[in-house]
Amino acid sequence: MSNPSSMYNTLLVIFFILIIILAALVIYYFMLKSKQKEEETVKVKNTDPETGMEKKEVAESTLRATTYTKKSVFDFMEFDDVDDNMIIQKNEKRFLMVLECQGVNYDLMSNNEKIAVEEGFLQFLNTLRSSIQIYIQTRAVNLTQSISNYKERVDAVGRELDMKEHQLKGKRESGLYEEEELDKEAFEIVKLRNLYTYGKDIIFNTEQMSLNKNILTKRYYVIVPYNLESNGELLGKEEVRNIAFAELYTKSRSIMSALAACEVKSNILNTLELVELLYEAYNRDEAEIFNAENSIMSGFSASNLTASETVIKKMKELDKEIDEKAIQTANRAILQAKSELERKYDNKKKNLEDLIEESALRILEENKTFVGPKTAEVAQEKIREQRDERKEEQRRKLERKRELLKKKKARKSGDDDEKD
C-alpha cells in the first residue's frame, strides 16, 4: 500500500500542470483577438465609405468603367441597325427578316386534322432551300394599357347611368309620363347598372391578377437570314439594302405559303415590331414596366422606327413581280405538260399496230387454258407472221422512198450542171 502523502504530492503536481496549460490557452486566445482587431482597423482605413469597396477595387472598377465604351455595348447587342423591316448585322454584311407565327391548338384537333398539320409541316421543311432560325420569346403579360382602356369604357357607362337616373327622377317628379313608360326606362337603368357593376368587378379582378408576375405568354418567330456575297462589297449601301430586302422578302413569302399548308398563319414584322422584339429580348425586367412603345414615345431611338413609303412601295413591287413570275412559271409548266402528253400520244399512234399485236399476244398467253394451248400457239404464230410481213412491207416502202430521194437529188444535180 502506497504512502498517502506521496499520492497527495502527485495529485498536487498534476493540478499545477493543468493550471499552467489553461493559463497558456487563455493567453493565446487573447493574442488572436488582438490580431483580428488590428486587421479590421486596417481594412476600415482602406475602405471607401461611399461604395463599401476596398480602395484598390474601386480603382480597378473605375478603370474598367472608363474602358467600357459605346462600341462594346453594340458588339454585345449583336446588331447594328433596324431599318426597312430588317435587322442589320455585321456592318451591313448580314440581314435578318422576322416572321411572327400564330400557333394552332393541336391538342383539340381530330386525328385527321393532326395528320394534315404534320404532313404540312413536313412539306414546309422539305421546301426549305436555305437555313432559318426558330425563336420563341416568353413575355410577361402587361395588362396596364388594357385595364386603362377598360376603365375609360366603364367610366363612360357610369356617366350614362347617372344621366339616365337623373332623367328618370325628373320624369317621375313631373307626373307627365305614364307608369308603363317609366317602368321601361327603370328596367333599362337596372340593366345598365348591372353592366357597370360587372365592369367594375372585372377591373378589380384583373388588377389583382396583374399583380402576379408569373403570367406569361409565348410568341413564335421564324428568322430568315441573308448573307452578303463577297462581290457585294463593291455596291453602295442603298443597293446592298435593296438586294437584301428583295431576297429576304421573296424567301419570307415562300415560307409564309409553306407554313399556311400546316394551318400556321404568319406575317412579316415591320420596323417598329422588330424594335419591340429586340427591346423585349434585351430588357426583360424593364419591359414589364416601361415597354417599347413608351420608350419610343419618350424619344428612345425615334428615327427609322416606322415603315416608310419607300418600303411599302418596295413590298408592292415585289408582290407584283412574284405574282407575274408565278404566272409565267405556271404557264411554262402547262406547256411542258401539254407537249409531254402530245409526244406520248404521237408515239402511241405511231406504234399503234405494234401495241395492238403485243396486247393480242399477251391476251392469248393469259387465256391458253380457255382457248387451248395448241390453238393459242397457232394464233400467236399467225400474229407474229402478220407482224413480220407488215414490218417487211414498211421496210420496202422506206427503201423505195430512199431510192426516189436519191433519184431526185441526182436529177437536180444534173439540171444544175446543165445550167452551168
Image (spheres, grey):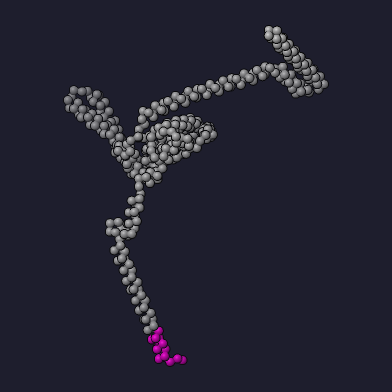
The single residue placed furthest to the right in the displayed view is 374
* Whole-percent x, y for residue 167 in the image: 21, 27
Magenta includes 185? no
The single residue placed furthest to the front in the displayed view is 420
Q: In screen coordinates, is 316 left or right of 163?
A: right
**Which residue appears at 25% of the width and 33% of the height?**
158
Span highlighted in magenta in the image: 1-14
**Which residue appears at 18% of the width and 24% of the height?**
175
Determine if residue 327 is in view: yes
Determine if residue 222 is in view: no
Magenta includes 10? yes
**Which residue appears at 37% of the width and 81% of the height?**
20
Q: Residue 384's quadrant in the figure?
A: top right
* Whole-percent x, y for residue 84 in the image: 39, 33
Q: Main secondary structure of the magenta part?
A: helix
Residue 46 sits above or below residue 254 on the image: below
Q: In screen coordinates, is 326 left or right of 84?
A: right
